[in-house]
Image: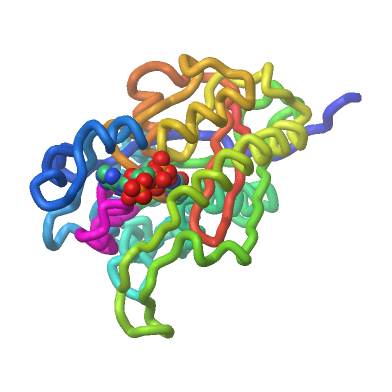
Amino acid sequence: MTASPVTRAVVKGVGHYLPQNVVPNSAFAKTLDTSDDWIVSRSGIERRHFAAKGENTSHLAAHAARAALANAGMGADALDAIIVATSTPDLTFPSVATMVQAEIGAHNAYAFDVQAVCAGFVYAVANANAQIVSGQARRILVIGAETFSRIMDWTDRGTCVLFGDGAGALILEAQTATGGTDDRGILSVDLNADGRHRDILYVDGGVSGTGTAGFLRMQGKEVFRQAVEKLAQTAETALQKAGLSADDIDWIVPHQANIRIIQGTARKLGLPMERVIVTVQDHGNTSAASIPLALSVGAAEGKLKRGDLIVTEAIGGGLAWGAVVLRW
Ligand code: UT7
């Protein structure tokens, strides 16, 4: 089959930002019946970053945005759009994306947020891809940014030890390509949701329901079970849509929730852990920020190289889940 020319959304830059305050597992053992040993063995998490008082999601997002622009060698004026994936916005509205737009001076960009919890970045990239492919925009800054420390119940050892704050950003640019599987850029996406599982991972507050911000509630074991089953499936579907298979993967860049979920998914896809970018030990679960953080760290460490085939996958509250196949 001969491919015909297409527009691809190609990665032009990547960057991230983590708040200065690093909190080791031992800090939780002072107030909760928990231990470094339990947290490491059950989740793989060793430390996480927490935002300082007054340091909000938009601030983390703007730092990550500047890092990605510098990495791309691009000015903020060149951006046509900004999409922020977050479930922890500074305010109910306006969007974090408009705050970032003002902060970095991206005066030509339209801006909005996407909320799909831990799958937020995958959803936002899929959305950006569709806008680029359709000609709506040529250059889009896609950010995942969270301050999950603001929705933790610090008395619930089953959740508060697992999450962290941070932001990562990716700049996608329209480029004409062959339409073949060797093209750089986004090659396929697969998105899914099943709202019947809303009760296994949710926040028990909100503007319309309670008028409060609420706290994160999770049935960890059930989420774990769903994650292991659904993540490999969505990755395989996305690969199929791209006309590729797991044998073609250079790197899995998974949502960083739990090392055992990451290992289980890699095993199902038949890839060794050497082919997986893992940051969960240093960041904890940063929800929508975890994939762009891992992409940025993987690139900075020299692991992700131009031309590498990358599969990202994530699942979170909703449930909402999905995968993106892209060539770096
Ligand atoms: O990003 C969105 C998606 N989120 C996830 O993917 C998270 C998915 N779930 C998980 O990562 C894991 O289920 C957890 C890390 C949350 C929990 O691991 P688990 O192996 O499923 O443990 P569990 O929930 O079955 O708990 C085992 C035991 C329980 O005690 P009992 O009932 O057996 O006596 C818990 O009460 O561990 C206890 N426990 C803890 N012990 C020490 C729960 N949290 C802690 C803790 N320290 N922090």
Q: Position of residue 207 (x, y in %)?
A: 38, 81
Q: Which of 178 and 187 is in front in this view?
A: 187
Judge from the rendering whether residue 160 lies leftward or rightward of residue 195; answer left or right.
Answer: left
Q: Give x and y (percent) for residue 258.
A: 41, 37
How is colour applied across the structure in the image? rainbow
Q: Nearer the viewer, residue 199 or 315?
A: 199
Q: How many labels does the image show?
A: 0
Place of residue 84 in the rendered image (x, y in percent of width and height, measured from the top left) = 42, 56
Q: Camera-side residue: 17 or 150? A: 150
| Quarter of the view holding residue 215 | bottom left
- What residue is drawn where x is 24% and y is 56%? 149
> Residue 285: x percent and y percent?
35, 44
Residue 51 in view here:
yes
Q: Residue at x 52, y 19 (%)?
A: 306
Is residue 66 magenta-colored?
no
Q: Nearer the viewer, residue 190 or 68?
A: 190
Is 24 situated above or below 218?
Answer: above
Q: Quadrant of the N terminus?
A: top right
Q: Is residue 65 something one can see in this rendering? A: no
Task: Work out which quarter of the rendered image holds the C terminus and state it.
Answer: top right
The furthest residue to the front:
33
**Residue positioned 32% across, 53% down in the render:** 159
* Residue 134 appears left or right of 279: right
| Residue at far left of view | 30
The answer to whether residue 233 is above or below residue 203 is above
**100 horizontally vs 117: left or right:** left
Residue under the point 35% across and 60% down: 101
- Residues rendered magenta in the picture: 146-168
